[in-house]
Amino acid sequence: MNAVLSTDAPAGPLAIDIESVVKTFGGVVANRDASLQVPHGEIHALVGENGAGKSTLMRVLAGMYAPDAGRVRVNGQDVTGWKTTEAIAAGVGMVHQHFMLVPTLTVAENVVLGIEPRAGWQVDLPRAVREVEALCRKCGLHVDPEALVADLSVGEAQRVEILKALYRGARVLILDEPTAVLSPPEVQELWTVLRALRDDGGTVVLITHKLDEVIAVSDTITVMRAGATVSRFATAGTTPRDIARAMVGRDVNLHLDALGAVDAAALSTSSAAPTASAPRRDPRLVVHNLHLRSDRGTPAVSDLSFEVAGGEILGVAGVEGNGQTELLEAIAGLRPLQQGRIELDARLLSGLSVRQRADAGLSHIPEDRHRRGLVLDYSIADNLILGQQHRFTTRAGLDQAHIQRHAAEQVARFDIRPPLPALPARALSGGNQQKIVIAREMGRDFGVLLAAQPTRGVDVGAIEFIHAQLRAARDAGKAILLISADLSEVLALADRVAVMYRGRFVTVLPRQACSAELLGPYMTGAAA
């Protein structure tokens, strides 16, 4: 049994008391001797590498899985093996990393779904709207109850998921990577809500890979490694580096460190004007006079022109929803051009399919791995050749031996866990699913890489590895267009930084002239 290291024992009655839980899926051990103690009125961070067993343990708590061994208590009651409905009735709610909303229903309809207020035999929609409005006011989560979920921003959809849990009376709230798709202002809004819930006696368990967020909002931290709980300590006085070391068992080069050579004082006071600095080498990706429309038919990208040179990372910063998605989809061949041209190594891409663009040397890490990157019911091995099946064929069909050799190589190179190529992608953690996409797109020969949110939902050790891969590709003469909602990631990796706002690049600067303070006004439109 692994000992749980603790600097301080939980004080007061426990809202959550999980002891020595074991959970396996076939031959895969997700939890081994996993424990968690959280008192009432605390924000508790649960951290660990991808595949450490965090989400599985929380799904045991939420009644989605029954443990093979161990004990689960909530508010002093033994609830081991209970069902999701029982967990919800007892005030335990879980907000998942991937939203579970019905896009064709309104906000109010989603929030009350399954427990709708009634007027006789009919659903009382006006009452539902009033109740959701009152809940929004009470908890500070503002969203239009009558808006269609399909029309919401990602941040607004996140609020709806939390409202769903609170409407059902959640006093124990579990959030799995809740800030992965939120802008910095939306993150701060979420922290305000969680602190208010804590101060009202509620309990929050936060699963996140963003260690600065752990420091900012949590009271106590539990670290998991290889399915087991390995340490528990107070957040006060702890640094991100301390947490990373506890997670991976070694010192980790956090991506913020990559800025080391840049003078921070100079950056913070820089008043450099917008400029389109010329790439250092011949351009490999050229975008000229690009105009694109969104799925709703509204302008998404307007008269955008830029180049990415070989041996360069062009980082695009900005709040999500300002045309970044449409831009990458157009380059990848997933969205038609309204106007303009795109060239790859001087070859016009118009008329080329997604496959033909890939064969021409274009790789694409999409921002949504579930929607664009993976077929979850396919094996790891099959996902590693998606879009490239023609490279793994014989006259008799798919060359299974070749596919398996390729999978074994990529699983080892990119540390995909568990290292079982026959497993369906659905069985892996979100971070390891992301590694499959990274391995497929960076594990082949390419000239230009479109990297959208490449480290979203990935642990600090994997971030270190992925960043090293991106830098190595750049140093090998590849051209990389990096789009990330994480400004620190852009500043750590990019040679030039562009800020995208309302479909345009409102500034393009060399990295040495950039800082968060300088770029922030451009990201919000204040300096545009």
Image (cartoon, rainbow, N blue to C red):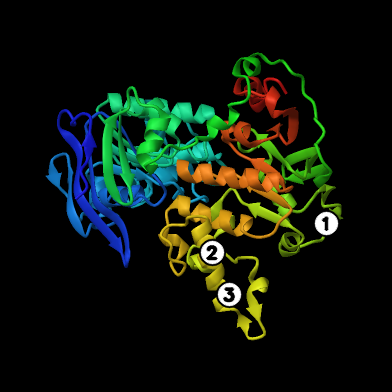
- The answer to whether one can see residue 60 in this image is yes
Q: CA distance from mark 3 to mark 2?
A: 11 Å
In which quadrant is the C terminus drawn?
Answer: top right
Mark 1 or mark 2, earlier in chain? 1
- Callout 3: helix, strand or loop? helix
Give the secondary structure at mark 2: helix
Assign a secondary structure to mark 1. loop
Q: Nearer the viewer, mark 1 or mark 2?
A: 2
- On the image, numbered disc 1 is attached to which residue? 350
Q: Which residue is mark 3?
A: 402
- Rendered image: mark on residue 409: 2
Q: Is residue 341 left or right of residue 326?
A: right
Q: Nearer the viewer, residue 297 or 81?
A: 81
Kind of residue indicated by mark 2? Glu
Provide residue 463's location: percent of width, then percent of height: 51, 43
Q: Is residue 392 left or right of residue 357?
A: left
